[in-house]
Image (cartoon, helix red, strand yellow):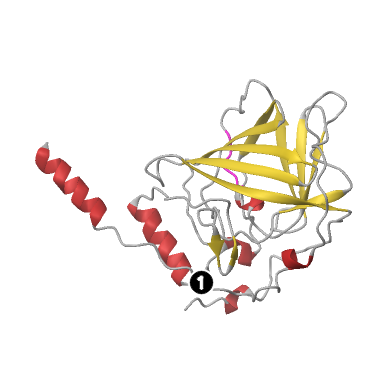
Amino acid sequence: MCVAWVALASGFAQQPPLAKDPGPFLQPGDFPEDKVPTAVAGPAPHLPDGRPDFGGNGAWYPGFNGNLAETTWKGVKSADKHVDVPFLPWTLTTYNERVENRAKDDPEAKCLPVGVPRFMFDPYPFQMIQTRNQVVFVFEGDNYLWRIVNIDATGTHPKNLKPTWLGDAVGHYEGDTLVVDVTGFNGLAWLDQAGHATSDKLHLTERYTRADSLTLKYEVTIDDPEAYAKPWTASNTIHWRPGMELMESICQEDEKSSMHMIGK
């Protein structure tokens, strides 16, 4: 047993280091987030039945958060906190290749859906529309214009799910937080622009909390036993833009630009 433990420890020690951040793609002051007037936050709004109100006259804007495990990426703010990602060997290798190749194989560049949780880290505004038994996300970009979360206190998913890019989402409210359980993924999406990989065993637990009128706190726990040694949690603070309207954004399946993404 002692020999096996030493071999295992040695294997971990020999893992390659993380690929380096490829560096800034915008100069300070160039990013749209730097040009938005500061608004004054008020209390978080609620619906008449007491549920948190995630809507209003405006839209949520994540900003560019290209790496959900780093606080800065490509020269701008990224996720809320640094995470020591518990990679398995194949996901570490895949991640490093994607960073070093400047994400040339990114599904988003080929007009494919980005999936979850990347929607909450990409620089496209979105709105949340709440009904009695659903929360509908409407996105400006990211090649998939909507996402539906069914509200079910039992957290029950349909049997024999067909794997999809966004998975099957079932949510419930815990006070001022919308908690969403997501499973049934196809394993093709990247978790973020940096290139964190997944398998079709991905299981997510998302938490949406409107902290005040201008702030949405997003937290996601990533549980994928075929991609990571243990579950890990990332988070992002998303800002409300009063009066913002979603624009029309179309990505065509036969686009001609991805062929120019040549990496190194």
Measuring from the top left, give residue 68's x and y in whole percent.
54, 53
Q: Nearer the viewer, residue 247 or 83?
A: 83
Measuring from the top left, give residue 151's x and y in whole percent.
72, 28
Report the residue that reaches farthest toward the top. Answer: 154
Residue beneath the point at 86% across and 56% down: 244
Position of residue 5 relative to residue 62, above or below, is above
Residue beneath the point at 41% across and 66% down: 19
Label 1 Cα crowd, 10 Å radius (few <14 / some 14-19 / many 20+): some
Q: Secondary structure at mark 1?
A: loop
Which corner quadrant of the image does residue 112 belong to?
bottom right
Q: Quadrant of the N terminus?
A: top left
At label 1, which amino acid type do we have?
Arg
Measuring from the top left, give residue 206's x and y in whole percent.
61, 38
Query: Is 14 inside the magenta-drawn segment?
Result: no
Tell whether 88 sits left or right of 208.
left
- Specify whether residue 251 is in view: no
Which corner quadrant of the image does residue 174 belong to?
top right
Q: For the magenta stretch, what is the residue range?
A: 161-165
Measuring from the top left, give residue 195's x and y in whole percent.
50, 60
Tell whether 13 sits left or right of 203.
left
In the picture of the structure, the residue carrying the numbered disc 1 is: 102
- Specify whether residue 263 is in view: yes
Position of residue 56 relative to residue 256, above or below, is above
Tell whether 43 sits left or right of 205.
right
Residue beneath the point at 63% across and 54% down: 121
Report the residue that reaches farthest toward the front. Answer: 40
Position of residue 211 relative to residue 196, above or below, is above
